[in-house]
Image (cartoon, grey):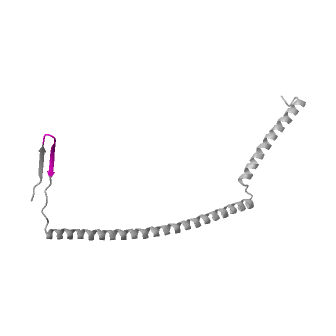
Amino acid sequence: MKRPALVIRASPDHASVSFYPKEDPVEGIDERIAKIEIAKELLIQAVATMDDLRKTAESNKREVRATLAQLQEVGGKREAAKSELMQVRRLASADIEVFRKVAGIPSPAQIRRERLLGFVLGVLASIAATAIWWLASRYFPTLGS
């Protein structure tokens, strides 16, 4: 066996350093066969691992497809429930309006209109009362005191 060597050379023009690594003697046939067997085992393990990964990927694909199908089903049910809720709200609104009409309960718009009308009529009545009092106190001075 050759040992690693470090060679240093110097000349007036230049200097050099060389390293020669250890060289292995030619391997025997048994050693080569052993290395080939190890490589073969590693390849078999790699192929088995790739098969496991492929199976896992296929299983994941099936799960994703099933989940997507469930999502579509839930989305359809959601739309149906939303539609049903809108119908229930419309019916409830219609029932409330019918009850208000039958019971004579005014709607919010009618309440606002009545309050505004009451306010305007109150202001007009106050102005009329003030005018009447002013006229009465002018013609009947004893009322003003």
In the image, taking residue 36 as reference, residue 75 lies left or right, namely: right
In the image, taking residue 93 as reference, residue 80 lies left or right, namely: left
How many marks can you see? 0
From the top left corner, tell me how far across and down residue 49 is, in percent.
31, 68
Which residue of the protein is positioned furthest toward the front in this rendering? 13
Placement of 48 over or under 106, stated as above or below: below
- Residue closer to the observer: 39 or 86: 39
At 52% from the left and 67% from the top, the residue drawn is 72
From the top left corner, tell me how far across and down residue 66 is, in percent.
46, 70
Q: Quadrant of the C terminus?
A: top right
Residue 79 falls in which quadrant of the image? bottom right
Residue 106 is covered by the magenta coloring: no
From the top left corner, tell me how far across and down residue 70 is, in percent.
49, 68
At 78% from the left and 43% from the top, the residue drawn is 120
Residue bounds of the magenta highlight: 11-19
Q: Quadrant of the N terminus?
A: bottom left
Residue 18 is covered by the magenta coloring: yes
- Residue closer to the observer: 57 or 115: 57
From the top left corner, tell me how far across and down residue 82 is, in percent.
59, 64
At 40% from the left and 70% from the top, the residue drawn is 58
In the image, taking residue 10 as reference, residue 56 lies left or right, namely: right
Which residue of the protein is positioned furthest toward the right in this rendering? 139
Residue 129 falls in which quadrant of the image? top right
At 15% from the left and 68% from the top, the residue drawn is 31
- Residue closer to the observer: 133 or 78: 78
Placement of 103 over or under 45, stated as above or below: above
